Image: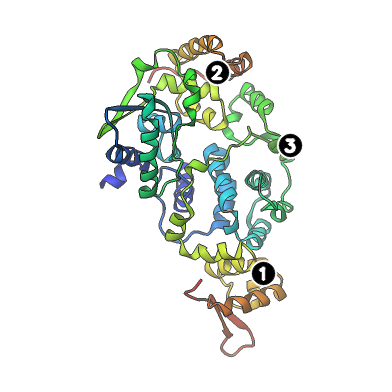
Amino acid sequence: MTDRMNTSTVERALRQLGKVLVYHREIEILLVGGAAGMVTGVFSAGRTTMDCDVMVYIPPDAMSAVEFAADQVAAEFELSPSWLNSAVQIRRDALPNGWEQRKILVSTSGRLHVLAVSRPDLIAMKMLAGRDQDIEDLQAMRLRADDVRFVHKYLDSLADKGTKQEQINEARDLLDSFEIHEHE
Amino acid sequence: MSEKIDILISQWASLGAGFNAEPCDGTIDIERLLLDTARHTSSMARLFIMTATWLHAYGDLVAKHRLKRLIRDELEPEFHAVFGLLLDTAQQGTHPLEFQTVIKLLKPDKHGRPLFKSAQQNQKLLDITRRRASALSRKWNLWCQPIEFKDDAIRPASWMMTRHPELIPRADFRGDLRASILASLRFDEGAGRSELDLAALSGGSRAQVRSSLRNLELTGKVLTQRAQGSNRRIAILQGAA
């Protein structure tokens, strides 16, 4: 198979991003949401979309350089100018504690290291978001008992981070509606 | 079911909806694609969201007269509410409301249920879905949460028009009857046989179709000529269309 057939547009765009990026030191970005699920193989690629939510930039001041490079990649790959979405940066507090130890290195291109949140982190964040597409994703992920424990712990931690109790309760309610699957 | 959705996704990808899927080749019957999407979107929320986003951005490309004709002739009643909600969602924020004339043909679901199958797995999930349902989805009796358009996952128009130059006249006509005539000549068997057939399949009246055909002939998009041994005038799609 050709490279084009083997890899998704997002993966090719992220590699190109590293190639065109100009910055004086190494950069890490953390993917969350559907793109993270897709590049880590948790979701079927064809069922996800081409936008990438980035929640963390290390160092933080690299964000503008990455966004500038993303504009070039958007033009080259004919993607939406906002395909790399940094707006989620403001929700960094929604990341489960200890995500740094669980993050997954997806690719390195030039000075850019692309990382993605792990499966339990993704489950926890999707449970909190709780949109219709998140519910579908969560069902496809076939939650296990350890996932449920992880999400409970995550939701317990959110009140201290300023998340509204109503939103936490909604997420708990949603979590309780899921069937628990055995380890496969 | 899954295979059918994969085909729909690859057609939408070809029209610039940002799925991570290989775009299919060839021309796409947008109106029939919309009907098929209404039939299958309950299995995939992202398909609904991306279609609504695409329609919000590129609604001008939809041939409205033909779409109404296809709803009457081909769309099973059980999908009318889904399609109504899809078009109603897409037209939010457009002035004038882009699909209002089409929506008038569609009615809400009789009983009330979640739009997506994922919400029908158990009573608890069903209750959550009903509680979180948007006002628009309640109007159609198909409960789903408010939809946010995913503009950051839509390809630019230039990408789509390069792949599908046949859509350029649709954009010029903003989806009026001329767009429906061109789409019928391209996709509906027998549409070019006579003015009467073309009117029936494109969704216009005979007088409207005759007038539109004159305009399309002027710009070289359609050629009309008398059928051999008959008084009928046949219509043939030209290269400019």
Q: Residues within 10 Å of mark 3 (few under 14, many from 20)?
A: few
Q: Does dot 1 land on a helix, a strand or a loop?
A: helix
Q: Choose mark 1 or mark 3, whichever is in front.
A: 1
Q: Which mark is residue B111?
A: 3
Q: Image check: A121 left or right of B90?
A: left
Residue B30, position as x, y percentages in the image = 54, 57
Say which amino acid is labelled 1. Ala
Quadrant in which the C terminus of chain A is drawn: top left
Q: Nearer the viewer, mark 3 or mark 2?
A: 2
Q: Residue at x 35, y 40 (%)?
A: A69
Q: What secondary structure is found at the residue carrying circle 2?
A: helix
Marks 3 & 2 on one chain: no
Vertical position of residue A151 compared to residue B118: above or below: above
Q: Which mark is residue A164?
A: none
Specify the subunit that label 1 lies on: B
Q: Which residue is mark 2?
A: A175
Q: Position of residue B98 (x, y in %)?
A: 66, 53
Q: Give the residue at x 40% y 57%.
A: B25
Of residues A179 and B226, the one drawn nearer to the viewer in this rendering: B226
Of residues B23 and A51, the one nearer the viewer is A51
Q: Position of residue A96 (x, y in %)?
A: 45, 16
Q: Chain of mark 2?
A: A
Q: Nearer the viewer, residue B238 or B4?
A: B238
Instruction: Give SS at disc 3.
Output: loop
Q: Position of residue B93 (x, y in %)?
A: 66, 45
Mark linked to residue B200: 1
Are the residues flagged by discs 1 and 3 from a single subunit? yes
Per the model, the C-alpha gap separating discs 3 and 2 is 27 Å
Contact between labelled residues 2 and 1, with CB atoms less than 8 Å apart: no
| Labels 1 and 2 within one chain | no
